[in-house]
Amino acid sequence: MNNKLFTLTVLMSLILFGSSWITAKAQTVTPNEAVITVSSIPTGTQALAVEITLDTSIIKLGSSATSNVSGALVVTDSMSVGVGIINTAGDLPPNFTITIPLEAVSSGTSMFSVGMVLDMIGGTEIAGAVASTDINSVTVGTAPAPTSLGTIMLIGTNITVVGPGKVAVAFSFSGPHNGLTAKLNGSKVDFISNNVGVAIIDIPASNPINLDLVVNSGTSTQTATVGNLNVSPTAAKGKPPEINSVTVQNKETISRLVLTGKRLSKTDTAVAVLPTNLVPQSDPKVMGAVLKAQFDVANCIPKGSYINLSTLSGTAAKKIKVHGKCSNPLFTEGQ
């Protein structure tokens, strides 16, 4: 992947010309939009631009960006990669958001970050103004060929996947799974609900890897590409961690998770629960071969969940043994 930085240094055009392009029908974008928050805008500012870093060979910014600033005009990619906004009714508020749809160019994974907030006319940095975004990468995958599972979409994990090791991968589907068996990259799929499957797959120390699904129904076999998984290289020596067991006790006021394993780190261990993408209240505590974490009652862990554990030396995954009641669904459409 070749990441390039494109800086918005000149006035973004405020005149929108009609344009058209062909969107690849066989590709999916995850996530499919980015929300940029701009804050600490000085009084008297009516227009500005935010520079954006992404790989234009993988994704592009959609032209139908919007803002929560009433009456404002938002323009993307007018002269370079970035987003500009002008408030035709007066000054911009000190804080606001811009939502930008993301469109596929080709399969792969692109970083996504924002840079300086600039004066649209002069192209100079606006002192004190800052911008942030709710995403840090975007994956474009080949949409799956029709299978007995219907429409298939990858469900992301909210930790950095460090290779090598094993990682749990979740995907949603629209069709019935009764009587079907499936493998993802050679690993058996666990159908944990009526519309979600999970498989623990081996990951190398490379970036990225394709996720290929094989569905069997009697004598019929169908294949599909679920998407791509971005794997970060190891940043520490040694073998990846291992998980021996992981249990959760859902109580009325708290959910307690206890994990036992090998090569757990006290300083760089991150955990995430799939497919709900839940994270603990605070950093997990590691005491030798035991890791403990707490989840608040709103983030209780439902049965069927899996855990991904990542350190600087790799990633490990396992299905969670869940005890106690939890009202959270395993998957919510659009997460």
Image (cartoon, helix red, strand yellow):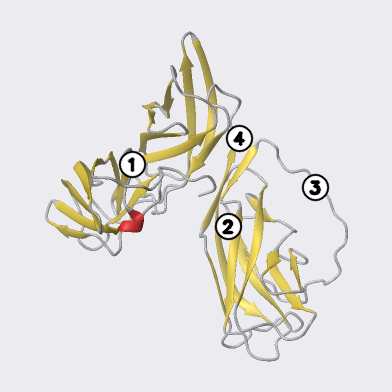
Crowd rating for badge 4 (residues with CA inside 10 Å; few <14, some 14–19, many 20+)? many
Q: CA distance from mark 1 to mark 2?
A: 35 Å
- Residue 3: mark: 2
Residue drawn at x 51%, y 15% is 221
Crowding at mark 3 (Cα within 10 Å: few <14, some 14-19, many 20+): few
Q: Are marks 2 and 3 in contact (CB under 8 Å)?
A: no
Residue 264 against residue 48 in the figure, above or below: above
Residue type at the position of mark 2: Asn
Between the residue at mark 2 and the residue at mark 3, the CA separation in whole angstroms equals: 23 Å
User: Pointer 3 and pointer 1: residues touching (CB < 8 Å)?
Assistant: no
- Find out whether the residues at labels 4 and 3 contact each other: C-beta distance under 8 Å: no
Circle 1 SS class: loop
Residue type at mark 3: give it. Trp
Q: Residue furthest front?
A: 252
Residue at screen point 66% across, 56% down: 101
Residue beneath disc 1: 305
Viewer-proximal residue, 215 or 52?
A: 215
Read off the residue under disc 3: 21
Q: In the rendered structure, which amino acid carries the disc numbered 4?
A: Ala
Instruction: Name the image quarter holding residue 102.
Output: bottom right
- Which label belongs to residue 143? 4
Horizontally, is 141 left or right of 101 in the view? Answer: left
Where's residue 329, x and y in %? 41, 44
**Mark 1: amino acid:** Ser
Q: Do the residues under discs 4 and 1 have CB atoms within 8 angstroms? A: no
